[in-house]
Amino acid sequence: MKLFYFANSRIPTEKAHGIQIMNMAESFAQNDAVVTLILPTRKNSPFKNTDPFEYYGVEKIFKIKKIFCPDPNFLMHLPDGIYIKVQSFFFIIGLYFYLLFHCRGVLQYAPARNDNIFYTRDEYLLPVLQKFSNRVVWEAHTLPKNKKHYLKYWQRCHKIIAITKGIKDELVNLGLDAEKILIAPDGVNIKNFQFPISNFQINYKSQIRKKLSLPIDKKNIMYTGHLYAWKGVDTLLDAARFFVIPSEAERSRGIYKNFDLLFVFLGGTEYDVKNFQEKAKDLSNVLILGHKPPNEIPEYLQAADILILPNSKNDEKSNWTSPLKMFEYMASGKPIIASDLPVIREILNENNAILIEPDNAESLGSGINTALQNQELCDKISAQASQDVQNYTWQKRTEKIITFIK
């Protein structure tokens, strides 16, 4: 099988979709597909001259082809997503001419080669891809507001991969055939979290914290990922306020008495980190470290005591998401506190996490307090999460998808 993966993405990127795309391309190739990842020539200054294979730690067993198209990054900070709309238009034009002159015979004009697949997670690429192939697979990570506009293109897809049950249910409600939709949550590379047994000696956490310049004498409450509001980071910041050492006059008003905590935030663009630092400037128990390369995340998670997944319920994106961090958290063997949302419950439950009311800082603070005071509970849910995540590797995900789309 030849698989052409089309992604309108900057690779490498500080965003999680880069991890997902590169790991899936590698895993498809490991499952005997001949993979070409087709990207635009988008600019990303922090990653200039960075080898994507090295950055993501994946084998160089697939090709990356970049299609030239203008990148109007001077529009980046304009409102209403103007940049991505203009940039996407340019990529669609570039993609059309690329397919017209370079891939004319791949599928539609060579029906005998029916083992070829066009694969994308960008729904707005479907119209142009379907002009050149009748075997287009769309991996649905979210649903656009103008669903009716895309309905005919979704119906024409060879198959659809939905990362959550919520997405599949919505597509079926729109009239799509349930049989052509596979639910395949995101995944994780388990081997990145397989530390040597000797690492789990009592002093290992101290050693790794020294390496990462994290304080040894505090409980580390950690969040990894972007700093968007719908990710719930503002709620976590508000929860951190409950654990700031109060003045003598305020002491009686304190909700929680654990003041030896450090709330660590990893991730975000330079622009978002700067804004988030401004929000947290009055908090002495918050550490904002910004973006870290994917290969460093497992060690940071090992340095944590509790991991937080505080997604908001107030944004439609939270109805569809299958967070990569959730699977990394599970693989780390650390206790997870997560928002109690239907899409999160597809993976997490009371047996492998502490679930709290979303958008409620007091509920999140209470969950943190529960974890701090109940080591037996933490050990139990961490062990169960470590066991459950074995079903969510990139390899297993890809095997299931290949069987479905052939």
Image (cartoon, rainbow, N blue to C red):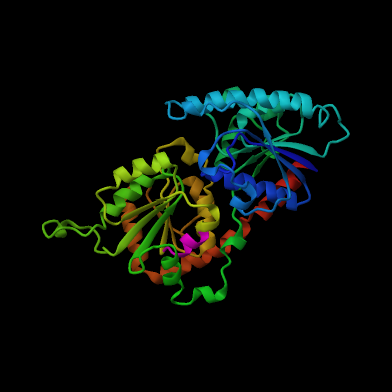
Question: Where, quadrant-wise, is the N terminus in this rendering?
Answer: top right
Taking the spot 47% from the left edge, 29% from the top edge, the residue there is 76
Indicate the position of residue 14 as horizontal and vertical percent values: 51, 44
Determine whether 108 is above or below 222 in the image.
above
Determine whether 176 is above or below 208 in the image.
above
| Along the viewing direction, whichever of 147 and 216 lies nearer the viewer | 216
Taking the spot 58% from the left edge, 38% from the top edge, the residue there is 10
Q: Is residue 200 visible?
A: yes
Query: Most prominent secondary structure in the magenta stretch?
Result: helix
Indicate the position of residue 301 as horizontal and vertical percent values: 47, 60
Question: Where, quadrant-wise, is the C terminus in this rendering?
Answer: top right
The quarter holding residue 21 reads top right
User: Relative to residue 284, is residue 173 drawn left or right?
Assistant: right
Taking the spot 68% from the left edge, 54% from the top edge, the residue there is 395
Determine whether 386 is above or below 120 in the image.
below
Indicate the position of residue 288 as horizontal and vertical percent values: 37, 51
Which residue appears farthest toward the left when viewing the image?
249
Q: Residue 315 lies in magenta, yes or no?
A: no
| Along the viewing direction, whichever of 255 and 13 lies nearer the viewer | 13
Taking the spot 69% from the left edge, 53% from the top edge, the residue there is 59
Indicate the position of residue 18 as horizontal and vertical percent values: 58, 44
Q: Which residues are magenta?
A: 298-304
Determine whether 276 is above or below 383 in the image.
above
